[in-house]
Image: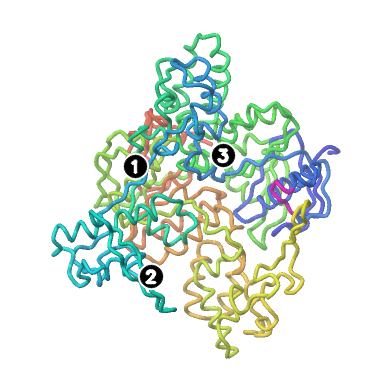
Amino acid sequence: MGNDIQIIGASENNLKRIDVAVPKGKLVLFAGVSGSGKSSLAFDTIARESARVWQESYPLYLRTKMPHYERPAVDEMRNLAPAIVVDQKPLGASDRSTVGTATDVAPLVRLLFSRVGVPSAGGSMAYSPNSPTGACPECSGLGEVLELDEDSLFDKDRSLAEGAIAFSQFSVGWQSRLYQDNGVLDPDKPLTDYTSAEWDFLVEGPAGAPPKVEIRSNNTGRVDKVDYEGVIPRFRRLYLNRDIKKLRTSLQEEILSHVRRGACPACGGSGLNPEALKTKVLGMSIVEMMEEPAEDLLGLLSELDDPWGASLARQISSYLRRMCDVGVGYLSLARRTNSISGGEAQRLKMVRHLGSPLSDITYVLDEPTAGLHPADAEKIGRMLEELRDRHNNVLVVEHSRQILERSDQIIEMGPGAGEQGGEIVYQGDVEGLLAARTPTARALSTPLAVKCDPLPWHDVLKIRDAHGHNLRHIDVDVPLGVLVAVTGVAGSGKSTIACLEVPRAYPKAIVIDQRPLGTSVRSTPATYTGAMDEIRKVFAAANGVSPAWFSFNSKGACPVCKGKGNVSYEMAFADPVVVTCEECGGKRYNPTALSYTYQGIDIDGAMRLTVEQAIPLFDNGRITRVLAPLKDVGLGYLSLGQPTSTLSGGEVQRVKLASELSREGRVYVLDEPSSGLSTSDAEMLLALLRRMVLGGNSVLMVEHRMELIAQADWIIDMGPEGGARGGEVVFAGTPEQLLASKTSKTGEWLRRFQQR
């Protein structure tokens, strides 16, 4: 006890001034329903304060270059150790970021080629597409070029005056005068009637000297003479051959709608120059080696007997072996990190930490088994135990029964969510939990129920010759009007079938993915659902004023913090200081806005109401219509003004589902909807999915949770393994039929869970 992490008076978010001792050198699991306070204790209190105190040991100048951590709401903490957070945030959205760069393997591979490659192209950076010495001169190392879809820029049935140029910058505003007032083209003549000479003049420009076109300013009357330029060369010059990221977002999107990405013809998409591509090691170029799955490359490197390269090969192999250990051996080092899932990203982060010589570190992991088949979750369990056995403190926020059973200690938060949570309802080992009466204990003692009366189906969505990613030109029928589960180990092709091939075969399919609702503190459940607009109108009508007074983005905003609720002060060589705005006390609104009330509360008080409290207070049909679904999906405890950036993964999923509950006749694709949900929350989710199906919808879910898979009407199991060894339909049938399957790993684990 004396060396435990001591937490006294923790009140971050919904924590109710709790005291707790978290043992060191143990695998500790934080359990509880969504919104119970697990993440508030593990991440927002322990991890944040550990990082903040650790950073205080650095000079102020260095601290200004590091992430800023505010002190959590806690009275006292003792015996903290440096903390490393392994979360599910993307590794990086850069087009240059790959699995090789994320795991630090790419520099070793480049060094290997510079040492033993034949013929040599030079030093290690000569093999990097991110370096001027190795980058392809045509695409600057990106490996792709933007190709203009010229036909998309013209509507030949219209005239120039009618908007025949399908690009706003050339059809509206001063640039449109280049094409309508040049004296050569008739602005009222449909493009389909143009002569070949007129068409060439419009599209490519004149063969000789360009004519001058007078452009008159409507504001000042000033007249400028501008050289005429064809649509295609002007579009290329202004919008393709420059960085468009500084343009407004809507214009960027419009520009990209007229271009398509293609592999650079000069380097074949590798991003490397010809000299780098000529070098071979083990008969492979660096591109070929990087494109090998990690598990295959591991075997190839064992054949390298060159004394200069053997040492490097062993270092590379140690990383590759750890990739296999955490279940991502099917990924290649060349795989772009912006194309991998959050679960894969988290496991790649683990690869770095597994080889670390550090000890007595506090690792805080956010649902490391999220998106994993039980077979893959076993590998994660062994990895967590390995981290612990290296004398580290391993704290895991998790719902997986497999990890829970491996834990040394369980801290369950609850008993409910939001205001009903924030307390410790159990702390102890697994045996003690089984004797308790907590939500997690009840889930552990409930046997797995396998659906024996699946709904019948008549129509199917036919997918033929599917070959996206690792799919092997497969044919599969997806039943409609029922609940379908797509299962399989990591990398088996589940998401490719569900999220790529189904929308491709049926473009009207609605995909509900795991992306967050928003990261801005100005985004709230009230604004996301549209309830905020109606609430403003209610307040405005009750007080006879403009609705703008009840927006902290408009007239109602506090003049000091501009509606943020806090003020940040830059401190030169010290950390920025963020404090609650003294003018509004964190309420975001100015005194005038707060002087208006409805039913005895001001607009700030309204934003502090929970969804459940707001529905009867406003008694407004439009407000009820958008808030009631949130209550139906179990989110009645959310406050209207809570930033959506603070919602958990499970809460985000249910907010998205809430907006779809009243729809009928739709095809929904859900990407791991149970991710981040406790067993009781998963049961609620299953009831919602059933409700959607009974409402006349078709629901297809990529899923790993056995509780949900066992209750599906039809199961499509992919595999048999991941990556190059996957991409086939291993099984298609009912849950009862899956139980009897001898070839499906999902069937094997379904039997194991049923026997527990």
In the displayed structure, 419 sits above or below 555; it is: above
Is residue 8 toward the left or the right of residue 271 in the image?
A: right
Secondary structure of the residue carrying tag 1 is strand
Q: CA distance from mark 2 to mark 3?
A: 57 Å
Res. 273 in view = yes
Span colored in magenta? 64-70
Q: CA distance from mark 2 to mark 1?
A: 39 Å
Q: Which mark is residue 262?
A: 1
Q: CA distance from mark 3 to mark 1?
A: 30 Å
- Give percent across and percent down for residue 33: 61, 53
Is residue 726 toward the left or the right of residue 414 in the image?
A: left
The image quadrant of residue 59 is top right
| Three-letter code for the amino acid on which mark 3 is drawn | Gln
Q: Which mark is residue 346?
A: 3
Given residues 437 and 503, the one toward you in this image is 503
The image quadrant of residue 389 is top right
Given residues 559 and 711, the one toward you in this image is 559
In the displayed structure, 217 sits above or below 411; it is: below
| Three-letter code for the amino acid on which mark 2 is drawn | Asp
In the displayed structure, 5 sits above or below 513; it is: above
Verify CB contact (< 8 Å) between mark 3 and mark 1.
Answer: no
- Give percent across and percent down for residue 595: 68, 84
On the image, numbered disc 2 is attached to which residue?
A: 224
Secondary structure of the residue carrying tag 2 is strand
